[in-house]
Each structure stands twice: as structure tokens, then as C-alpha cells.
Amino acid sequence: MDRAIYPSSPLIHPPKAFVPPVTHPARSHFATNPWTVVAATTAVQALASATTLSVPTIAPRLAEMLGISPALIGYQTTLIYTGAMTTSIIGGAVVRRLGAGRASQLALALAILAVLLVLGGSLWTIALGSVVMGLGYGLTNPAASHLLMRFARGPRLNLIFSIKQTGVPWGGMLAGLMLPPVALTLGWRWAVGLVAVLSLALLVALAFGRRRWDDDRDPAHRLQQNPFGAVLLVWRTPALRYLSFASMALSLTQMCVLAFMTTLLVAEAGFGLVEAGFVVAIMQVAGVLGRVGWGLVADRIGDGFVTLLVVTGLAMGACLAASSLTIAWPPIAVYGLGALFGSTAVGWNGVFMAEVARQAPPDRIGVATGGCMMLTFSSIIFGPAAFGAISVATGSYATTYLAVAGVAAMGAVSLGVARRAARARTPSTAG
């Protein structure tokens, strides 16, 4: 009953304030240890990423089974990030109401549901499953940023966020090394199902620290928010606005690489599916090392923007090199290209996420992260699909990387503007 209707009734008791549940002191200390939080958020990121990459990694085999062109995988990526945009809009509100730990569990539950849909084996169930994958993936960053800024904030912020963002290449390594062999020996359904089993195990494990992580949640917080509120926050903060523009370019570059690398190597470099998976794994290992390394560099020089500019320039070089890839390339050169792509096009995210958290209002980090990621995902909706269309029109996956290099160049320009805006920012404009 509504107290506004019966304000003086003695039978109506005011709702009790939310009281955090009591937890064992030792368990609470372990749960709030910064490295426990980093490990948990990294693991969630890894399995969410592995889920989104499960279909692209086995794209040639799946396309053969369905009787479609592998180039259509770009549209699958579009569906994923359509879903991710949806949950990014309300990600901050979900974290406030459910808690960051519960939001992470929800992300994993959606990943499991997505896999079950993909296992249906038809274009329609794969398409629907791809959207659900994105719904889960869109919750991971707002939840992780909230936890990290609460329990792991310190002088090594770029490194902390970079370690968390290694979850993306870790997930890529899982997909690249494990799924192709399983798909070839047991079938593609077993390969994709493996990701669901691992996600379920992690979902259960997160229950260990969830109560302590979520003791700041607000059960009364409304999920129905202005759908553009997060984006407006980003848009009204110049540094965040241009950071998001740069992220749109870098994410498009990254996803074109991740979504089409296997197909590029099989179609134009003469690699087998397992060999191509090995190159993808090299790329992801380099992504792990790159993310940690760039985080250390950013903390050392005290300038995340300059670090991102260097990374973007190297990613452009990798794209230009990929545009000339042919079957005549020696394997060692292809491995080197994969490492360069991994350390740059896959290695920028941690420094970016740390810079977003630094530039956001302290009490709205989850909201700002969600707004930035919504803008970021908007480029991915159309980018890989456009990549696939251009590759079909030109008859070459490699040549299409010239267009990707141009996109990365626009990202570099945006980073320069964002750095200027951040330097000019005053405390009065922080909100």
C-alpha cells in the first residue's frame, strides 16, 4: 500500500531501510581484497568475450553447415552489439539496484541463455542468441568499473583496469585455442556448449563475494531511466565525448580484426582452421601483454591519452600491413602481424576504461561507463557488417583493411581533442 495515500494510518509501517547482510569477517576481507575483485571482474569479462567470439572463431565450419557465406559473420557481430547497446543504456541503473556482483551474475546467465539459443542450429536461433550475447556483454563494463573504483582504486589505476580488460583477449584465447579443435573432433555444438559450462561455473563462484560487493546497492533505485541520460552525461563532458569518439573508431578496428581474422587467414593466406586459430591465439596473448604493458606505460608517464595515441598509430600500421596479405606471406610474418594486431587493436581498452573512470563524476562512474560503451557499441553495429559488404564488393578481405586504417586515423584525431579537453577541464565542470 502506498504511504502517500494513507500517510497517517497506524497500521501502515514505513519500509525498512536496506540493511546489508552480515558476512563472515574473513570471507568479507577476501572478497574486498583488490586482487580478488580484479580476478573476478577479469574472469567475467573473459567468459562474456569468449561467448561473443564463439561463433566467429568457428565461422568457416558453421557457415559450411548452414550453407551461407562466412562474410555474413559481420551481421552476427552487429546483432551482438545491438544487444550490448541496449543494456549499456541501463547498465548504471542495474548496478545501482541489483549491485555490481549480481549484475555480473546476470551477465553470465544471459551468456548461458545465448549459447542455448545458438545450439538450436538455425539462422534464426543463432541471430536471437547473438542479441542475447550482447545483452550480457553490455552489463560487464558498468559492473566492473563500479567494483574496481570502489575496491581497487589507487595510483595504479591504468594497470588495474588494463588487467581487468585482459579478460577480452583471455576469452579470445579460449575461443581460438579450444573451440576449433573441439568443433573439428566433436562438432560445433560441443565447442559452443563448452563456453556455457564455464560460464555456469563462474556464475556459481561469484556467489562467494557477491553480498559484500553489493552492500551498497539501492533496491529502490528505478530501472526505468531516461534512455539517453547516460549518453547525455558523456556528451556534456567534452573529454568523455571525444574519448567515446576515439573508442568508436578503435572498437570498430578491433572487432573487424577479431571477427574476420580466421576467415581472412583461411581464405587468403592458405591457412587451415586450426592454424588460423593458433594465429588468433597469438593475437590474444599479445593482447593480454599489450593491455598490461600499456597500462604500465600510462601509469609511468602519467598520461593515458598519449599512450592511446601511440597504440592507435601502431594499429593503423597493422591495418596497412594486413591490406597486402597474400598466400605468399611466410608463416612467421603472419604470426608477427597477429602479435602486432593483438598488442594494439586488442590492447587499448584498459587505458581507455581507466581514463573514462577518471574523467567521470565520482558518483556516476557506472553511468558514464555505460554511456561511453553505448556510443562505442554503436560503431560496431555497422562496422563489421560494412567490412563484410566491402570485402564482398572488392573480392578481398585483405584490401578492406585499408578502410579500417582510415577509421583508426579518425580515432587518433579524436584522442588529441579529448586530451586537450581534459587538460582544460576545471573542477566546476566535473559534473
Image (tube, rainbow, N blue to C red):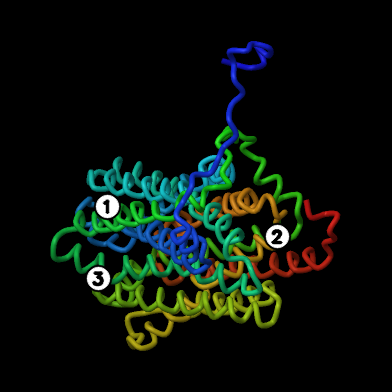
Q: Which residue is mark 1?
A: 68
Q: CA distance from mark 3 to mark 1?
A: 17 Å
Point out the tag, 2 or 3, that comes first from the N-terminus. Answer: 2
Considering only vertical position in the picture, is 400 above or below 78?
below
Furthest-left residue in this view: 185
Kind of residue sitting beneath label 1: Ile
Name the residue rendered at 55%, 36% in the picture: 219
Name the residue rendered at 65%, 40% in the picture: 228
Along the horizontal axis of the image, is 279 left or right of 389?
left
Q: CA distance from mark 2 to mark 3?
A: 39 Å
Kind of residue sitting beneath label 3: Leu
The answer to whether any part of residue 424 appears in the image is yes
Q: Position of residue 180 (x, y in %)?
A: 24, 67
User: Which numbered circle lies on residue 153?
Assistant: none
Point out the tag, 3 or 1, that comes first from the N-terminus. Answer: 1
Considering only vertical position in the picture, is 225 above or below 101?
above
Q: Position of residue 60 (x, y in %)?
A: 26, 62
Q: Quadrant of the N terminus?
A: top right
Residue closest to the eye, 77 or 164: 164
Kind of residue sitting beneath label 2: Tyr
Regarding mark 1 in the picture, which secondary structure is present there? loop
Name the residue rendered at 70%, 45% in the picture: 232
User: Which numbered circle lies on residue 273?
Assistant: 3
Residue closest to the eye, 149 or 248: 149
Q: Which residue is mark 2?
A: 242
Regarding mark 3 in the picture, which secondary structure is present there? helix
Q: Nearer the viewer, mark 3 or mark 1?
A: 3
Q: Nearer the viewer, mark 2 or mark 3?
A: 2
Q: How many residues crowd mark 1 within 10 Å: few (<14), some (14–19), many (20+)?
A: few
Label 2 with label 3: CB-CB less than 8 Å: no
Point out the tag, 1 or 2, that comes first from the N-terminus. Answer: 1
